[in-house]
Every structure is written in C-alpha cells, then in structure tokens.
Amino acid sequence: MTTTLITGANKGLGKESARLLVEAGHTVWVGARDEARGRAAAAELGARFVRLDVTDDDAVAAAFATIAAAGTGLDVLVNNAGIAVRRGDGEALDGPSVLQTFDTNAVGIVRVTQAALPLLQLSANPVVVNVSSALGSFWATHEPSRPASHYVAIAYGSSKAAVSMLTVQYAMAYPGIRFNAVEPGITATELGGGDPGSHPGRPAAESARIVAKLATIGPDGPTGTFQEDAGELGW
Ligand SMILES: NC(=O)c1ccc[n+]([C@@H]2O[C@H](COP(=O)([O-])OP(=O)(O)OC[C@H]3O[C@@H](n4cnc5c(N)ncnc54)[C@H](OP(=O)(O)O)[C@@H]3O)[C@@H](O)[C@H]2O)c1
C-alpha cells in the first residue's frame, strides 16, 4: 500500500492530483490549511484529512505527528501548495507580499520536506514531487516559443526558480529518494486569488496527470529532473 501526502489539496491541482492517486490505489492525505475545506475535499475523494499550513512550523510538525500516529507511513510527498499574490491587475511586489510568496512556494517545501524525511526514509519507494512552474525556468523564460518568455512574474517566477534548485539540491542530498519538479501546464484554478476558473488554462483534472505520473514512479524512475507532459523541461 502506497501512502501519499499532498499539500494544498483542498482545491485546484492538488485536489485533482489527490483524486487521481486515490483512483490509483494510494492512501491519500489531503493537506489543507483550512479544516472545513480540507475535510470536505477528503470526504469527497475518499482520502484522509490533515491540517497543514506550509508557512507554519508548528502546524507542519503537528501534521506529521498526526500522520505518524495514524500508522500509514509515508511513501510519496507532493509539495503542491502555492500562491501568486496579486493586487489590482498586477503582481503584488511589496516586501510582505513577496516574502509570503517565497515563504509559501519555496520555504514551505523545505519545511514540509524536512518534516517528511524521517517517514520517507522508512519507505521502500520514497518519492517527492515539487509542483513548480515554467515561469521559474531560466530556459523557458529565454525560449520565444514558450508562454513563459512573454509573461512577467517577478516574485512568483523567482520563487519557482527556487523550487528548481531545491529539487536539484534535495536530489543530491538524498539519493535514495526521487525528487522531481513538475510544470503542470497553464491551468484554470483559483491561483492568484480569482474566482474558480478565473485563471486561464486547461482543466485541473488534465494538468494533474503529470503530477500523478511523477508521483507514481518506481525506484528506477528519474530524480533531480524537471518534467512536463512532453517530457523533460529545461531548467
Ligand atoms: N494554475 C496554473 O496555471 C499553474 C501553473 C503552474 C504551476 N502551478 C502551481 O500549481 C500548484 C497548485 O496551484 P493551483 O493552480 O491549483 O492554485 P489554487 O487553486 O489556488 O490552489 C492552491 C492550493 O494551495 C493551498 N495553499 C496556499 N497557501 C497555503 C499554505 N500556506 N498552506 C497550505 N496550503 C496552502 C491553497 O489552499 P487555500 O484554499 O486555503 O487557499 C490551495 O489548496 C501551485 O504550486 C502553483 O504554483 C499552477
């Protein structure tokens, strides 16, 4: 039995990834900072709920204490929780907003991964997927054929560039665990704080497939890579 924790799984890509992994037979923990929304999503999906705010050290410690006490173990961690802070029709670039972006998108991955390591290291097939973005790819932002080269995202993009290096560094530090970053594709979610579907893009259920694919790799799977639907993506 494979057990998977997904952060920010109450809606959007995280929820659809949870749905696919439940269908694949995983025991899934829906991590969510809001208890009511998280419990509702977990009940709908046939998953377990754990309260988890990736910006709160105590909440992260409590979440892993809950998972450890439940005795499910942990094989797969999907670091999905992420934000893009907008003000008016642009990105919010004041200090607190940018700190919040980096705290959630990058530091949150370190907080959750560090707390997950003791359980992951007990797994026969430990896997970590970091949900990143092509907006954090130096290659894609310099490639005219890619949307990322035409879309400015100063704080969000640089926080996702940090996710790339976190992926590479963790892959080097823990060769027994497969760490990969994923670009899910432009997806219609509430990212950026809009109404459901206000973000342009394809349905979350479609984009979640690449997340589920990387979450279900075996011991011979890749590590330290950046992946999208078409295969490997340049850093
Ligand atoms: N949509 C796209 O086009 C796109 C493209 C590339 C990458 N991504 C990435 O995909 C991931 C999922 O985003 P999405 O598009 O599905 O957006 P979304 O619908 O806004 O979902 C984001 C999820 O993250 C959660 N979250 C935010 N801050 C959190 C915190 N401090 N602790 C725990 N959970 C937190 C949200 O919870 P609440 O409901 O409590 O806010 C929500 O469950 C993000 O990492 C995003 O950067 C999205």
Image: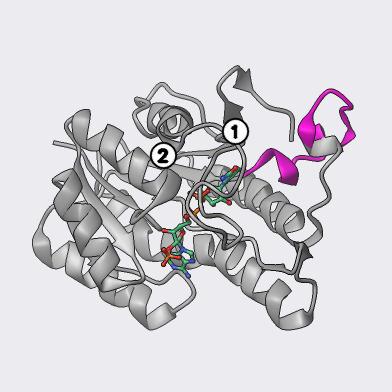
Residue 211 pos. (x, y %): 44, 34
**Whether residue 148 is visible:** yes
Residue 112 pos. (x, y %): 43, 63
Q: Residues within 10 Å of mark 2 (few under 14, many from 20)?
A: some
Disc 1 Cβ-to-ligand 1 distance below 8 Å: yes
Q: For marks 1 and 2, give the one nearer the viewer.
A: 1
How is the protein colored in the picture? one colour
Q: Is residue 54 magenta?
A: no
155 with respect to 228 (left or right): right
**The label number, if any, that marks residue 185 in the structure image:** 1
**Whether residue 64 is visible:** no
Marks 1/2 in contact by CB < 8 Å: the verdict is: no
The quadrant of the picture occupied by the C terminus is: top right
Nearer-the-camera pick, 20 or 216: 20
**The label number, if any, that marks residue 176 in the structure image:** 2
Q: Is residue 138 magenta?
A: yes
Determine whether 20 is above or below 90 in the image: above
Q: Amino acid at mark 1?
A: Gly
Q: Amino acid at mark 2?
A: Gly
Q: Secondary structure at mark 2?
A: loop
Nearer-the-camera pick, 219 or 197: 197
178 with respect to 46 (left or right): right
**The label number, if any, that marks residue 17 in the structure image:** none
Q: Secondary structure at mark 1?
A: loop
The magenta region covers 133-147
- Residue 13: image quadrant is top left
Q: Which residue is painted at 20% across and 30% down in the image?
A: 23
Mark with earlier residue (1, 2): 2
